[in-house]
Structures are given as C-alpha cells and as structure tokens.
Amino acid sequence: MKQIGYAIATVILLLTEVLIALYVHDAFVRPYIGDVLVVIVIYTFIRIFVPERCKLLPLYVFIFAALVEFSQMFHIVEVLGWQDNRFLSALVGSVFDWKDILCYVAGCILLGVYEVLVRNTARRR
C-alpha cells in the first residue's frame, strides 16, 4: 500500500516540476525550488519499487543527482549526441552550477528528516 502513496506523490511532484518548468520564469522558484523538488521526485519514484526503509536512500539520491550535475561540466548531452533531443537535453541539463548541488543537498536533508520522522512514528506504534 505504501507504493500507491509514493506513486501518487511522484505523479503530483512530477506535474508540479513540469508546471514550474513551463510557466514559472522567476529568479527563485524555478531555479531553486525546482532543484529541491527534483531529488524528492527521484526519491518518491524509487520508493515505489523499494517501499521498505532504506536508511541511506536520501544519500544515494544526492549522489545520483550530483553525478548528473557534474556530468554537465563535461557536456554529456553533446557527448551522447542528445543535443537535438529537447526532452533528453532538458532532463539531463547542460549547464553545471554549484547552486544546483546546494539545492540537491537541501532536498536530501528534507528527505533525511522525513525518513527520521517516519522511523520514529513507526517505533511509537
């Protein structure tokens, strides 16, 4: 049953990300909140398939997101020949930014706090 909740959360968060990308053109929500949310989307998606507690999942999500971000330094989109594919080039991104890494850290800290709260709630039952 947890999988359904995570699936619903993934869809809602993914739709939120798409709406931000398409309609929000500001200097805060799109560049910062969008990057915080992206790691949460990845987390909820993984939790659909790994519903039981995975203590280090927020760390693993951060490592994955950081690797994708660092790959932008090496122009991975061009290396893979994806520069003409709007979806893939937008998904991977093309510009490395340390602020994105900090947003991923913030999102994964939120996920870590969530994990602790869920664990503590489960222990009290």
Image: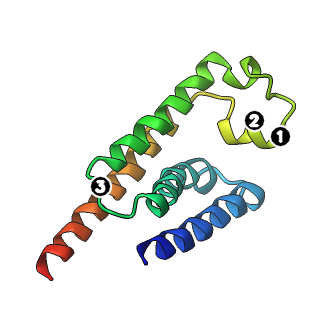
At x 58%, y 53%, the residue is: 34
Q: Secondary structure at mark 1?
A: helix
Q: Is residue 11 left or right of residue 105?
A: right
Answer with mark 3 or mark 1, whichever residue precedes in sequence.
1
Location of mark 2 (residue): 89
Q: Amino acid at mark 1?
A: Arg
Q: Secondary structure at mark 2?
A: helix
Answer with mark 2 or mark 3, whichever residue precedes in sequence.
2
Numbered circle sitting on residue 112: 3
User: Residue 3 appears at what percent x and percent y?
Assistant: 47, 70
Location of mark 1 (residue): 86
Q: CA distance from mark 3 to mark 1?
A: 33 Å
Q: Amino acid at mark 2?
A: Ser
Q: Residues within 10 Å of mark 3 (few under 14, many from 20)?
A: some
Q: Is residue 94 left or right of residue 116?
A: right
In the image, residue 7 sits, relative to residue 46, either above or below, namely below
At x 47%, y 37%, the residue is: 64
At x 55%, y 52%, the residue is: 38
